[in-house]
Amino acid sequence: MRIAYICADAGVPVFGWKGASIHVQEFIRALVRRGDRVELFATRVEGDAPPDLADVGVHRLPALPKGARAAREQAALAANHGLQTALRQEGSFDLVYERYSLWSYAGMEYARAAGVPGVLEVNAPLVEEQAEFRLLVDRGSAESVAERVIGAATVLIAVSKAIAADLGRHANTRGRVHVVPNGVNPDRFLEGVVPFCRIPPGVFTVGFVGTLKRWHDLSTLVEAFGMLHQAHRETRLLIVGDGPERESMVRNLSARGLLEAAYLVGSVPWSEVPGMLASMDVGVAPYPRLARFYFSPLKVYEYMAAGLPVIASKVGQLAELIEDGVNGLLYPPNNPSALATALDRLRCAPEVRARLGRAARATVLRDHTWSAVVQQILSLARLEPAAERVAT
């Protein structure tokens, strides 16, 4: 098949290191492995394509101007004309697939006019997220764009039930909304990966990977680790990632006398993440209690693919992915004492860590590879027969 993949979000460098970037790359990689031809239309590219994606056609959409937010919003809205023109010039396609962004609607409307399936992947309620965590000047136009693009799509893919519920509030979406959680490429996390951080043997290492943002509740992680470290000095905290909460986290670690027990390695290239995970004894996802938890966290799938035992707060989709005591541990969100207890439980029991890690990897191999995700979405778009679970 010939597929147009659209990512018009200026916050997603499609060949970068962010989680969203890896999401785009892995989805396209799964298509390429099937033998599909992919044309990528992106506002922000950042770097060259990985070697195995070198044959993907890359079409750069106009970059947004720097400066005032209002001007950037208007430029993003106007970019729909350029996207529509580019699609017409490069067509025809068997499928138009778009990662939903705040201002883009031309892709789905092009697909509808061309009579081909248009699949819209929705990862977050972007209007609310932009207004709450960043800045949204023209909310009315953003909501109008959402109505247009959701209305034009043939299939709406929500990465969580919470997102599906949001989509269901729009007009005439019945029968078009499907929950398909994110996935992982297990081939990146095979046994024998050399640990990247040379932490002395016997030092129990608690790990976190991700952008340091407030919705990860890093303060609970630090407090829980402080309890563990106070009782057991042969413990370390390994933080992989960077972001706006880094300064606050460093202050917190310093105030608790934990800086010397912490490794903050910052953002690392995608290729180094498996080595980082191999340096950990446990991967933690300390999400807080939120009014709406709509994430499908890539980090948790990666922990599991690496065979790491996972400790996650019991929120949203995580409570469905992780079966407490079987393929990971769950604890009540915003509860550092409970997290510390779970950490200490795994510190004391390497055989439990190994058992949970094996079960975690088996879970993602069975249900959550990118190949399986792509197969399911193509089936929903009626481009492939419905398949049983696909394992790689």
Image: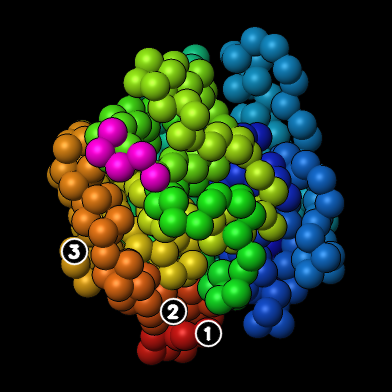
Corner quadrant of residue 182: bottom left
Q: At numbered mark 3, what does the secondary structure look like: helix, strand or loop?
A: loop
Foreground of the two, 75 or 236: 236
- Provide residue 1's location: percent of width, then percent of height: 68, 79
Could you give the CA–CA distance between mark 1 and mark 3, rounded to whole angstroms?
A: 25 Å
Q: Which residues are magenta?
A: 230-234
Asked if labels 3 and 1 touch by Cβ distance under 8 angstroms, the answer is: no
Mainly helix, strand or loop, the magenta region? loop
Q: Residue at x 59, y 65 (%)?
A: 27
The residues bearing labels 2 and 1 have C-alpha atoms spaced at a distance of: 7 Å
Q: Which percent across, then down, holds residue 136?
A: 48, 19
**Amino acid carrying mark 2 in the image:** Leu
Query: What whole-number distance in Å separates the C-alpha atoms at marks 2 and 3?
Result: 18 Å
Q: Which mark identifies residue 324?
A: 3
Which numbered circle lies on residue 392? 1
Please say whether residue 355 is visible from this viewpoint: yes
Kind of residue at disc 1: Thr
| Residue beneath disc 2 | 365
